[in-house]
Amino acid sequence: MTSQTFDPLAALRRDGDPEVDVFVWGTVFLDIIMTGLQRLPDGGQEVWAEGMGSCPGGIANLAVAARRLGLRTSLAAAFGDDAYGDFCWDTLAEEEHVDLSRSRRFDGWHSPVTVSMAMARDRWMVSHGHPPPVGPTDLIGDPPRARAVMAELAPDRPLIGTDAPTWVEKARDAGALVFADVGWDPSDTWPREVLDQLAVCDAFLPNAVEAMAYTRTSSPSDALYALADLVPLAVVTNGEEGALAIDSSTGEEASVPALRVTALDPTGAGDVFGAAVVVGTLAGWPLQQRLSLAALSSALAVQHFGGSLAAPGWGDIADWWKHQRVATVDDSYHRSLRRRYAFLDDLVGDVPAGLGRRATATIARHVDVEGFPAAPPAAPPAIPPD
């Protein structure tokens, strides 16, 4: 991926602004994605995958998604000193141009690994890893000045400190907007107290199942209204039903349907959606446009395999919109798309050709993408000397 990318915040940048647009902390996994499986193996069996890819995963999905959408992104994470850590570090720093100045390498620490098997629009994952050698307080120290940070609500890692401010509170005190999501609760208790952390958040983006479970409501819309009482920007994603949101800071309420696409792998789609919401919010777009860009970005991602590999850039968005503009299909659905995304006319015209597209960062050799090269023609037999 080229170091140049379309900058959606170019018109807003001023001297003295933060150098970082979005700052994130978390765990980076090496993701190995097996694709094209016809079935999963039974006990003792081996099956072959038609393709594979390798890429940084975990929190790297979010960092890459934000960077490909033009945000100056900084990531704090622990990296092992093994080959997996080398690959993830080099891919993020050299290929994706994510700032790793708050990240560190640790001798003897095994990099976390996830093997993902994609089949029939679903995936199965097996992971291995150990807790990072240090937590966010020791790793980050004082976070860099940033326009936004993205964090996760968790009962065992609160965003609100008791004895000292957390890195999230420090970032917010320095002027950053705090965007938060939440993970699945394996205990199935969904403690309501987790939502108390929204007191230091500016936006919250759970999926519908999580939102209903934490708010004790029975519909995504009821969950949205409950969350809108707790945080300025509440967004609830609902899979194939789309997304809905309330921004009480602007008085806007909006919803968008999901795009009709063939979904191959949902890995990282939520991270792509969240990164797009951050872009639109920092750029000051209307809520409907923010949700529309997020829905489009996640739809482009799920049509490809593999987390950060699938995160679209502005070049991919420009390609999609230009295709819609010249498409001859004129049914109600496509007319709706053209109305809904007309705002892209003012954006993608500034996207240079060839910039900001998906990468194919992978440990695998080109054979997985291009097929095994044909054997070179046999050399003619040597002519013995006279």
Image (cartoon, rainbow, N blue to C red):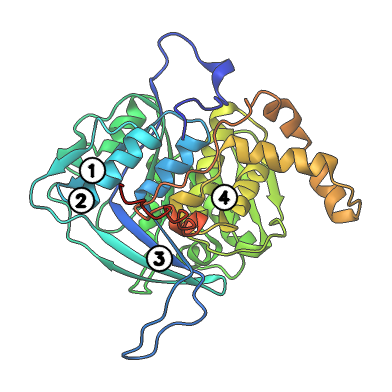
Secondary element type, mark 4:
strand
Residue placed most toward the observer, 250 or 273 = 273
Q: Amino acid at mark 2?
A: Ala
Disc number for residue 235 = 4
Gap in angstroms between the C-alphas marked 2 and 4: 38 Å
Mark before the other along the chain sequence, 2 or 3? 2
Residue receiving disc 3: 184
Report x, y in % for residue 76: 27, 39
Residue 27, image x, y percentages:
28, 51
Direction from residue 290 to residue 13 in the image, left or right: left
> What is the secondary structure assignment of the residue under circle 1?
loop
Give the Cα distance between marks 4 and 1: 25 Å
Residue type highlighted by circle 4 = Val
Q: Which image quadrant for residue 285?
A: top right
Residue located beneath label 2 in the image: 83
At label 1, which amino acid type do we have?
Gly
Q: Is residue 339 something that shows in the picture?
A: no
State which tag comes first along the sequence, 1 or 2.
Answer: 2
